[in-house]
Structure formats: structure tokens, C-alpha cells
Image (spheres, rainbow, N blue to C red):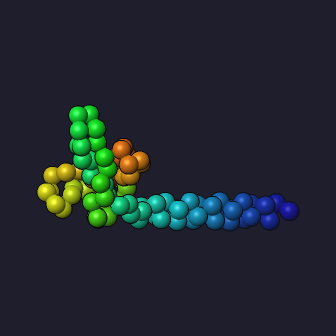
């Protein structure tokens, strides 16, 4: 019986680790549509689709709008609020 339990545990641990590693790799490839923040009045902003894809995995290179090269792109939350910063696709 002991000869069966230890290999079964090792196989289970190996399988779990393989699935965990695979899930992490899929997350790294998640692309997001980039939105830029536009001021429309005093203390009023809207999120405008920049027609550009970015990555949601944090890196040193922030995704910038190709229209001006300086505007940071964000994830879409609501029409009046953009969320987290997005990053350049590696």
C-alpha cells in the first residue's frame, strides 16, 4: 500500500503544478483595448477608445496613445472612469 500512496501523491502534485503554470502563462498574454482620458469640462472626464491594443501585465513600458505619443492608455471601467494603466505589448 505504501508503494502506491507516495507515487500517487507525487503525480497529483506534478499535475497541479503543471495546471498552475499553464494558467499563469495564459494570463501573461491577456490583451486589453486601450482607452485615453479626455477632459470635457471642469472636473469632468470621459474614456475614449484609442483603437489600440495593450497588455495588462505590468512592465516598465506604459502603453501610449499613437495619436500623440505621450497620453497614457488605461483599461475601461465606465464611460466616465478609466481604470488601471496598460502596458506595451512585448
Closer to the camera in the image, 31 or 41: 41
In this rendering, does residue 20 appear at all?
A: yes
Residue placed furthest toward the right: 1
**Residue at image x 23%, y 38%?**
41
Q: Position of residue 13 (x, y in %)?
A: 65, 59
Closer to the camera in the image, 31 or 14: 31
Name the image quarter holding the C terminus.
Answer: bottom left
**Residue at image x 18%, y 62%?**
66
Q: Is residue 35 above or below residue 26?
A: above
- In the shown orientation, is residue 5 left or right of residue 67? right
- Quarter-wise, where is residue 28 in the image? bottom left
Residue placed furthest toward the top: 43
In this rendering, does residue 61 appear at all?
A: no
- Quarter-wise, where is residue 35 in the image? bottom left
Name the image quarter holding the N terminus.
Answer: bottom right
Q: Position of residue 71 (x, y in %)?
A: 19, 51
Closer to the camera in the image, 43 or 3: 43
**Residue at image x 63%, y 61%?**
16
Q: Position of residue 30 (x, y in %)?
A: 42, 62
**Residue at image x 15%, y 52%?**
70
Q: Position of residue 6 (x, y in %)?
A: 74, 60
Total numbered labels placed on residues in the image: 0
- In the shown orientation, is residue 19 left or right of residue 66? right
Amino acid at each position: 500500500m505504501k508503494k502506491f500512496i507516495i507515487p500517487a501523491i507525487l503525480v497529483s502534485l506534478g499535475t497541479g503544478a503543471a495546471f498552475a503554470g499553464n494558467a499563469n502563462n495564459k494570463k501573461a498574454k491577456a490583451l486589453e483595448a486601450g482607452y485615453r482620458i479626455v477632459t470635457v469640462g471642469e472636473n469632468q472626464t470621459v474614456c475614449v477608445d484609442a483603437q489600440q491594443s495593450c497588455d495588462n501585465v505590468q512592465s516598465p513600458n506604459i502603453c501610449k496613445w499613437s495619436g500623440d505619443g505621450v497620453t497614457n492608455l488605461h483599461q475601461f471601467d465606465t464611460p466616465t472612469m478609466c481604470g488601471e494603466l496598460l502596458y506595451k505589448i512585448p
